[in-house]
Amino acid sequence: MSSPTSPVPPKLNTQYLSSSNRKPSSTASPATRNPLSLRIYKVLGANFDDPSTREAFEALVEYYPPESEAHFTTKHDVSKAAAGAGSDSDTEDENDPWAVRWPARAHSIPAVGLGPGTTAARARQSLQRDVEGRLADGGKKFLEAFGEVDKKLDVLRDHVQVMNSQCEAMETRLRTTNQSCKYLLERAEGLRAQQQTTSTRQEIIGLFLDRFTLSAAELEAIASRDVPVGKQMFDAMDKLERIREDCRVLMTGEGGETKAGLDIMSSTSEQLEEGSQKLHRWCLFEFRQLGRDAHVEVEPLMTEARLHAEDLAAYHAQSNYMPTIRLEKLCTPLKVRVQQTIRSQEGSITSYKIANLLEFYMIIMRRTVGEEAILSRALTELTEIAYTVFFDTLAAHGRSLLRFLHPAEDDLVAPVSLRDAAQVLKEIIAVYDSSLLRDEHQGGVALSDEMQNFDTTLAAMVDPMLEMCRRMAALREREGKWETAIFMINCLTYLQTTLTEKHFEDMLNESGLEGIYKHINSKDPEEPLSRLPGASGLELTAVLTSFDAFLSVLDPISSPRLALLRAPNPRIATRIHQAALERVGRVYLRVVEEVRAPKNKYEAPQSLLGSRRPFGQEAVLWQVLGVENSGVNK
């Protein structure tokens, strides 16, 4: 038996593959129609006689072995039946761009044995089928990959849309922010401009102050006692003089420059005054040092008049020389400065203080250098101007009281305007009492025809107040004369009470009880009065001594302070005086009560009180003051 042998692959007959044995089909399409067909034709049209090519074709034959005729026919028919009549494997679709264009073949293949070229054709068809299948598989993979890419692109599109919406929102917010920041930027620009303007003004003000004010060192050189008199002090005073010269330019203006010039002139005047006082004290000290070094031989019988005879003669000569001194250059700036100060005042109290001060210096200069001296005449003129301004202010105040009138209130008390005017009157009286002109004005005699005394001042103050009260009372006449009379009495009583209060304060100060009375009212109830400064045993003895002296010169009927009070009833001044004395007596009794109290810890209070009048006894006190018991009880 022969062993079975494996089928040997048939040898490839390459003679049918040569270009000389292939007949071109009349229906072949151009080679340029399909790149794959062009490639296959190029391969088929090559020379296959070389060994490598033959080896390749042999491998192809092994991969696609020949089949039997029946199998081929059956397979071919099955494929044709499956594909349809018009789907021959050798006939490609005209619309398929990837189809391989093979040469046309006859539609009828004889079912005989395998003829020449059948194996090659079948191999070619199988190769085409496999290549197309792989191309289709690759295309499917590409489609799947592109599908994934498309999905990713959809996701990317969604993200891009979200980003687009966010960008639009951000753009809207940015536009809104820019619109809102526009006003902020404009405001910042305005503030920057204001800052520059402020910086410029600050520099200008700094330069102005450097020119028109003294530095701290210069002020210390003028005012401080620690800095000796020397070049530094005189340089500062020279600078003050230069400042005053420059102020004349400021005072020529009409706006705020004039006010600034006046303020600078006022401050520099005070500083020059301080420097002059310091220089004066230094000169006095130096002259005292010179006097200590001098050795004067004095005879035992040499009197004080003989010691100072030469000085008295020099003083007399200088007093005779004073009227001849030419003071025009001094009087002119003095008059200008004082007139500016007088006319710049709006309050009646300040105007009266200035007029009072000028009148005092006028009297001093008249008695020193005479009435015909230039300085005396200048001061007289300034005093007249000051009193004119003062009385104009009082007249304006009186007109203001009468300008807005209304009926009296239902409680018929003194109106607020009357109380304010009475307070101003009290302050003017206080200024007059503190001045040295009271003796000059006693009896209502004026110093000259132009100037007025204090009686005129009282009339200018009180008459508008009374006229206001009468007119306000007249507005209530329709309600009855009784209410009108009560309102007038209340107003007049308030004026009298105001005078009583002021008179009491002055008499309490003169009696010496004011200090200890303030300690009694302000001290802690648990703190002993004797431990307070100004209220010890020795100081209390001094207070009682002062009160004793006050009682010695006291007039219980009248007071020179009330001599200018002109009233239809002369007893009004007496009543005011006695009411003030009664209050002073009550203050003394309060002091006696506190001294006798054990909590204040005074040693031997009876001895302290019994050493001076009225010896701590209430009856003696009222007898000395001239106040009746009925008045006290009332």
Image: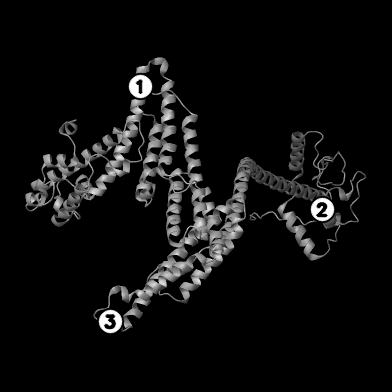
From where the camera sits, is residue 211 visible?
no
Quarter in which the C terminus is drawn = top left
Q: Which residue, given by chain and number where applicable, does mark 3 sit on?
A: 298
Compared to 497, does 550 lie above or below? below
Which quarter of the figure has residue 143? top right
Foreground of the two, 267 or 611? 611
Q: Nearer the viewer, mark 3 or mark 2?
A: 3
Q: Mark 2 or mark 1, which has the lower sequence index?
A: 2
Q: CA distance from mark 3 to mark 2?
A: 162 Å
Q: Which residue, given by chain and number where applicable, does mark 1 sit on?
A: 485
Compared to 97, does 628 lie above or below? above
SS at circle 3: loop
Type of amino acid at the residue the image marks with label 3: Val
Q: Which residue, given by chain and number where applicable, does mark 2 sit on?
A: 40
Which class describes the residues within 10 Å of circle 2: few (<14), some (14-19), or many (20+)? some
SS at circle 1: helix
Which class describes the residues within 10 Å of circle 3: few (<14), some (14-19), or many (20+)? few
